Image (spheres, grey):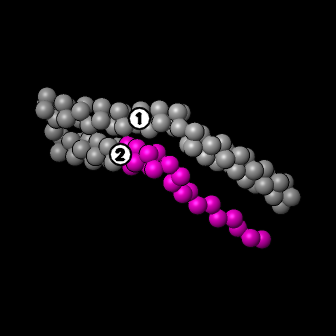
Amino acid sequence: MSKQLYVKAPFCSEHQRLLEESQSALEIWDEHRAEVCRTRLNGKEAGDELLRLQVRYARAYTLLQRHEHSCLICQLVARIEGSDSENNSDVLSDSTLCA
């Protein structure tokens, strides 16, 4: 039985840029939050910094979501990916029933 290989290629450069910004903001927020927990920092400065980083991530993620809903290329890719996952789940359930 042959396996199908799916490669996610960035079809939209703007989506890729927004995704990278969102992921970077999330990683920075998570790292800083972990550092605050590990060192048990508290106080207004630590709280303000965490809040600032959380807002930065929320903005980046919101821009990504808005882009996905307004970009025709991203909508097309989402539809194609959705139909591929439906086809894959049908194959999986068929093979599960026959196994």
Marks 2 and 1 close (CB-CB < 8 Å): yes
Image x and y of residue 59, in percent: 35, 33
Earlier in the chain: of badge 2 and badge 1, it is 2
Residue at 13% x, 28% y is: 44
Q: Please, what is the three-letter code of the amino acid marked with disc 2? A: Glu
Mark 2 vs mark 1, CA separation in Å: 10 Å
Residue 89 visible from this viewpoint: no
**Which sits in the foreground, 38 or 61?**
61
Q: Considering the numbered disc 1 on the image, is that residue within a helix, a strand or a loop?
A: helix
Residue corresponding to mark 2: 21
Residue corresponding to mark 1: 63
**Which sits in the foreground, 76 or 55?**
76
Residue 98 visible from this viewpoint: yes
**Which sits in the foreground, 27 or 37?**
27
Residue at 17% x, 45% y is: 39
Image x and y of residue 13, in percent: 45, 50
Rendered-image quadrant of the N terminus: bottom right
Question: Was residue 36 drawn as part of the magenta stretch in this picture?
Answer: no
Q: Please, what is the three-letter code of the amino acid marked with disc 1? A: Leu
Magenta-colored span:
1-22
Which numbered dot is residue 41? none
Q: Is residue 52 left or right of residue 12?
A: left
Residue 78, picture quadrant = top right
